[in-house]
Amino acid sequence: MQYQGVLKKMQTEIGDPIQYYLIFENDFLNVNQVLNKELSIDFIKYECLNCHLDKPIYRQGFCKSCFFETPSAGDWIMRPELSTAHLGKEDRDLEFEKKAQLQPHIVYLANSSNVKVGVTRKGQVPTRWIDQGAHEAIEIVEVPNRYLAGITEVALKEHVADKTNWRKMLTNTIDDENLVEWRNKLKQYIPAETQEYFIDSNLETHLHFPVLSYPEKVKSLNLSKTPNYKGKLTGIKGQYLLFEDNTVFNIRANEGLYVGLTIN
């Protein structure tokens, strides 16, 4: 089987295990179905997710000029506390920012390699947790806009991590945590503006990934430097493909690369 197209974040479907899909312009692949098969990945060209031109990708699937111009790459994406749509202030495109920022957001705790705090739109639960490779997660605050979620995250990350150790996540060197206890312990640090939105009655969500075997150590594949790769697929976790030879391939980090895929 052969596929060709630009890489974008894998789409997911909750299940036991989680189902993963690579979506191309005229086709799609259920990646779970090619576990334990040999997969060839060949870099063909770049294709910016915004302008669709063959220009080197700078960040988040965008060429450099688009990264600094498109509203979907504003600083508030990575730093929600910088959101200003609730004030009617434009960053790059106020209508876009209103749609994205002025909707319910969740502040959550997730355990991928360690307990971390994060922010996502309510509609992205549990997709965001899956993308981070979290095997357990819990919502702790639900607020009406992105700014309030952002200031809550800033306050909480003084007391809990806000980053995932991706190597630990991919080698599955992780511990289970009692996230209800973590949630209750962190309540005292939630800002006064968002205390009323604290969620005190929910339980952890547990997620199961389609992995036949985890790598003992990880070697990251960069298609821009190694344009041709072949290996046996042994797992999918987060947005990573895991291979038998300990190679790991981050689909999200390679968005905007136009590739050919061959399944043997």
Image: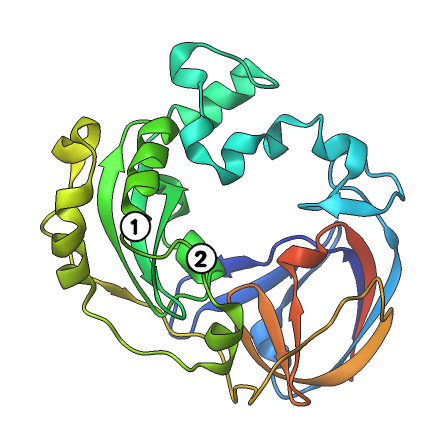
Q: Inspect this view and state whether residue 72 appears.
A: yes
User: Which residue is located at x 57 percent, y 86 percent?
Assistant: 215
Mark 1: secondary structure: strand
Tell me where residue 62 appears, x and y as whole percent: 74, 41
Give the mark, 1 or 2, whose residue is nearer the N terminus.
1
Left or right: where 264 falls relative to 217: right
Amino acid type of disc 2?
Answer: Lys
Question: Label 1 belongs to which residue?
Answer: 108
User: Which residue is located at x 59 percent, y 30 percent?
Assistant: 74
Rendered view: 95 above or below 211: above
Tell me where residue 69 appears, x and y as whole percent: 71, 25
Question: Label 2 belongs to which residue?
Answer: 163
Tell me where residue 216 appears, x and y as whole percent: 55, 90
Q: Residues within 10 Å of mark 2 (few under 14, many from 20)?
A: some
Q: CA distance from mark 1 to mark 2?
A: 13 Å
As drawn, the residue found furthest toward the left would be 201
Foreground disc of the pair 1, 2:
2
Amino acid type of disc 1?
Answer: Tyr
As drawn, the residue found furthest toward the front would be 158
User: Which residue is located at x 61 percent, y 54 percent?
Assistant: 9
